[in-house]
Amino acid sequence: MQLALNATLTNVEAPERTGSELDDIDALVRTYRPRLLRFVTFAIGDADLAESITQDCFLKAYNGRASFRGDCAVNTWLTSIAMNLIRDQQRLQKFRFWRQARATAIDVNEAANFLPSKECSAESRILIKEQTRQVQAALEHLSVNQRSIFLMRFAEDMELAEIAAAIHMPLNTVKTHLHRALKSVRAQVGGSR
């Protein structure tokens, strides 16, 4: 009797799925969309972005339906796909600022042209241009975190607490990355301190 009850409960919790259930995208969306959209909206707090992620979730599920093993409920499978998409979105947002800055950035070789020319002699501009080139070359050798933190601190003049909040990193970790970045840049540029 207990064995029969367990078998019945197992079938209720995660009924066996047929390929046709996952093949019918309209039925899949009709059945699971309201709950999934509610979950994603709550997780990220942006209704428009949640709508987009939910649509992407169903697209990924439909395209990957052959990989569904059936060892969990479809609802659980969809939720795990949604969680991965949410994580991807959060990763992208971390460095959105730098993608925008890169798209509008001026060439480092032109940066010296934007310095006050009355106060700088031709020799000074050449030295500044060379130092800028050396720093840029040194930045190429830093890790992504070190480079980002270095640029936020010195190119964008952000406070350390602002940087920590912007990249969702503890303040002491930001300080460590900045210290290592400075040490590396100084070693490569040849500066002292």
Image (cartoon, rainbow, N blue to C red):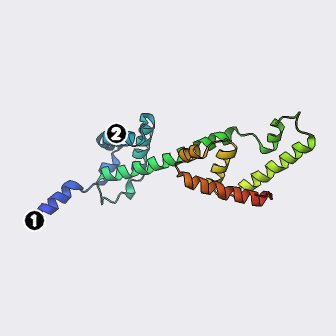
Q: Residue at x 19, y 54 (%)?
A: 12
Q: Is residue 110 above or below residue 139?
A: above
Quadrant location, the C terminus: bottom right
Depicted 45 relative to depicted 21: above or below: above
Q: Residues within 10 Å of mark 1 (few under 14, many from 20)?
A: few
Task: Name the quadrant containing residue 183.
Answer: bottom right
Left or right of residue 1, residue 192 in this image? right
Residue 16 coordinates in the image, percent (x, y) = 25, 57
Residue highlighted by disc 2: 38
- Identify residue type, mark 2: Arg
Residue 148, image x, y percentages: 63, 49
Q: Nearer the viewer, mark 2 or mark 1?
A: 2
Visible residue check, residue 60: yes
Q: Amino acid at mark 1?
A: Gln
Q: Residue furthest left?
A: 1
Secondary element at tag 2: helix
Q: Which residue is mark 1?
A: 2
The N terminus, quarter of image = bottom left
Q: Mark 2 packing: few (<14 Cα in 10 Å), some, or many (20+)?
A: some
* Cα distance between the residues tagged 2 and 1: 37 Å
Q: Position of residue 32 (x, y in %)?
A: 31, 43
First in sequence, mark 2 or 1: give its number: 1
Can residue 95 be spotted in the picture?
no
User: Do callouts 2 and 1 mark residues in contact (Cβ within 8 Å)?
Assistant: no
Please tell me which residue is depicted at 60% across the width and 47% down the height of the picture: 160
Q: Please indicate whether residue 167 sits to the left or right of residue 191 in the image.
A: left
